[in-house]
């Protein structure tokens, strides 16, 4: 008899796990509350404009390749991947740094800013590459069950990289504040401040400068479509508009889920929804982590987002643009230490139609703006508008053009939407941060300690936030299920 598995949610981790489990011979059904799959990576289509609602940076192409290769496929079977050149642009108050698609170009740009800086940069990236090889091939593929998983001959001889912070390491080698910000930016994807992120995570710098920034033609939603198509070809049943209201347990064994009022039994239950929410679906005595546990964790930021259609092409922009023209320390403090609406935030602006004509009508531009904010902040239409005005004025100033008169429409997305759409804890966008004390075996576990046959996957468990880690999280939990549930 094939064992049955019910999966809650259809984010990248759930889709990944579903594919591996279906391939291993389980009967897999996904129940997703929203009307489309992909979790935070949904798509907005409006008046000929196409927006990725969530992730927009395609980094670590090797992880996507490995995922599809595990099923005898490659990314090119599903979507066209283009390397962006340049990768992105950073606007400072008095200069603009352009990150090219090759180390030589990036070194030239570093030299322009600080003479002699290309030498320490090459050394820094060589170490980052070493960390990437260790992380991706040795550390990240472990299920986070025990501290000993981190003990390999490669990590034990490099312990300082776990205790030193990325911030310290960068500052040891570089003095120019713009170069420091440029090198600290990639670890922001991990959700914590650079001065609380182990220097081992410089592997993100290798992902950035070494592996480059890519774009699937048509947008990030192409990855979701690819995974959905793969899952269905493997026999996974996908049910959308299917809100899971309860996980029922019988004699310490996961027994059923209640979906829109209907009880569905299965041998195993796996939740790819936010971990905190998943546990609230259980009776209290079966929850592993208390409210005070979640309260004490460092969460990755939430975001205020705007999706804007412009009726003309904009100038002086790349596909990805960072606006680091204000003080990062102050903004970081307002996200992590003293959560409040930021006074003068950094922001990110994405214009996929700069390199991909399919994303906007002819002679128009698709724009996506993101301001990182602390999770759990008050979210009102007035505040959203106030912040839009603030960043669009700075955007006009830094890029030297008037864009306000060319806005056809603007949609916004913030804390309340993250909670309503994804049951996200405090409206977090990227899950739980990867600080030293929230790494690997110190993260919420893939397998429930209290309920047999109940598992979790996604950005609040191992390995952490981001699309590539979500693909890995799905693989790890599928392997654990196969090991435990024969
Ligand atoms: C704005 C934004 C920008 C980002 N940018 C990037 C980026 O550029 N690059 C990158 O790599 N990563 C990025 N990320 C992070 C990345 O998108 C996430 O880490 C990843 O998508 C998380 O996937 P997941 O599998 O954990 O689950 P999620 O995407 O959170 O999916 C969980 C699913 O569970 C469903 N669900 C919840 N409760 C229930 C229920 N009761 N019943 C049924 N279904 C339920 C939800 O509707 C959702 O579909 C970004 C995230 C956001 C929000």
Image (cartoon, rainbow, N blue to C red):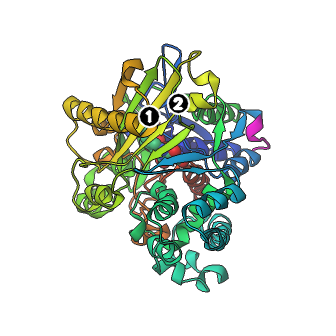
Secondary element at image label 2: loop
User: Which image quadrant is residue 106 in?
Assistant: bottom right
Task: Looking at the picture, tell me which residue is in the foreground, 183 or 272.
Answer: 183
Secondary element at image label 1: loop
Tell me which segment is drawn in magenta: 71-76
Q: Is residue 293 visible?
A: yes
Crowding at mark 2 (Cα within 10 Å: few <14, some 14-19, many 20+)? few
In the image, what residue occupies the spot 78% across and 41% down?
73
The residue wearing badge 1 is 400
The extreme bottom residue here reads 157
Could you tell me how far apart the alpha carbons at marks 2 and 1 are, in whole angstroms? 8 Å
- Cβ–Cβ under 8 Å for marks 2 and 1: yes
Quarter the C terminus occupies: bottom right
Q: Of the numbered discs in the image, which one, if any, rests on residue 163?
A: none
**Which percent across, then down, holds residue 129?**
67, 67
Q: Is 476 covered by the magenta stretch?
A: no
Q: Is mark 2 within 8 Å of ligand 1?
A: no
Q: Nearer the viewer, mark 2 or mark 1?
A: 1
Q: Please tell me whether the stretch drawn in magenta is mainly helix, strand or loop.
A: loop
Q: Earlier in the sequence, mark 2 or mark 1?
A: 2
The residue wearing badge 2 is 315
**Which percent across, then down, holds residue 479?**
63, 57
**Which percent across, then down, holds residue 420?**
31, 34
**Which percent across, then down, holds residue 97?**
54, 52
Task: Looking at the picture, tell me which residue is in the foreground, 18 or 442.
Answer: 442
In the image, what residue occupies the spot 55% across and 61% down?
113
Q: Is residue 259 above or below residue 444?
A: above
In the image, what residue occupies the spot 66% across and 42% down?
84
| Relative to 290, 451 lies left or right | right
Task: Looking at the picture, tell me which residue is in the foreground, 6 or 417.
Answer: 417
Q: Is residue 24 above or below residue 218?
A: below
């Amino acid at each position: 008899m094939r064992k049955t598995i019910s999966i809650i949610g259809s984010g990248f981790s759930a889709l990944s796990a579903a594919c591996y489990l279906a391939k291993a011979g389980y009967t897999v059904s996904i129940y997703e509350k929203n009307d489309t799959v992909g979790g935070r990576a949904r798509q907005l289509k409006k008046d000929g404009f196409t927006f990725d609602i969530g992730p927009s940076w395609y980094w670590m192409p090797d992880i996507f390749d490995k995922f599809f290769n595990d099923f005898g496929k490659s990314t090119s079977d599903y979507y066209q991947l283009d390397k962006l050149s340049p990768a992105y642009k950073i606007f400072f108050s008095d200069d603009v740094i352009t990150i090219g698609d090759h180390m030589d170009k990036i070194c030239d740009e570093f030299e322009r800013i600080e003479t002699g800086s290309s030498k320490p940069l090459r050394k820094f990236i060589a170490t980052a590459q070493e960390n990437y090889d260790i992380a991706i091939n040795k550390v990240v593929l472990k299920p986070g069950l025990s501290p000993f998983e981190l003990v390999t001959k490669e990590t034990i001889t490099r312990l300082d990289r776990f205790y030193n912070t990325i911030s310290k390491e960068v500052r040891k080698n570089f003095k120019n504040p713009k170069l420091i910000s440029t090198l600290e930016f990639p670890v922001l994807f991990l959700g914590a401040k650079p001065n609380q992120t182990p220097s081992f995570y410089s592997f993100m710098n290798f992902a950035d400068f070494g592996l480059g920034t890519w774009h699937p033609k048509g947008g990030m939603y192409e990855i979701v479509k690819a995974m959905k198509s793969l899952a269905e070809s493997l026999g996974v049943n996908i049910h959308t508009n299917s809100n899971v209201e309860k996980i029922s347990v019988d004699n310490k064994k996961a027994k059923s889920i209640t979906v829109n009022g209907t009880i569905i039994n299965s041998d195993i239950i796996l939740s790819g929804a936010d971990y905190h929410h998943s546990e609230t679906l259980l009776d209290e005595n079966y929850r592993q982590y208390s409210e005070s546990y979640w309260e004490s964790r460092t969460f990755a930021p939430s975001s205020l987002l705007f999706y804007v259609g412009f009726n003309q092409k904009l100038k002086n922009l790349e596909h990805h643009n960072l606006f680091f023209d204000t003080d990062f320390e102050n903004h970081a403090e307002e996200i992590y230490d003293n959560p409040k609406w930021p006074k003068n935030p950094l922001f990110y602006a994405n214009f996929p139609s700069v390199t991909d004509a399919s994303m906007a009508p002819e002679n128009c531009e698709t724009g996506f703006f993101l301001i990182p904010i602390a999770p759990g902040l008050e979210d009102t239409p007035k505040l959203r508008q106030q912040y839009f005005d603030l960043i669009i004025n700075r955007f006009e100033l830094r890029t030297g053009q008037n864009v306000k008169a060319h806005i056809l429409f603007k949609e916004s997305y913030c804390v309340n939407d993250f909670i309503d759409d994804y049951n996200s804890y405090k409206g977090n966008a990227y899950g739980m941060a990867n600080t030293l004390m929230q790494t690997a075996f110190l993260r919420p576990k893939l397998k429930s300690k209290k309920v047999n046959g109940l598992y979790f996957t996604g950005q609040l468990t191992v390995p952490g936030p981001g699309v590539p880690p979500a693909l890995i999280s799905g693989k790890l939990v599928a392997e654990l299920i196969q090991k435990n549930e024969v």
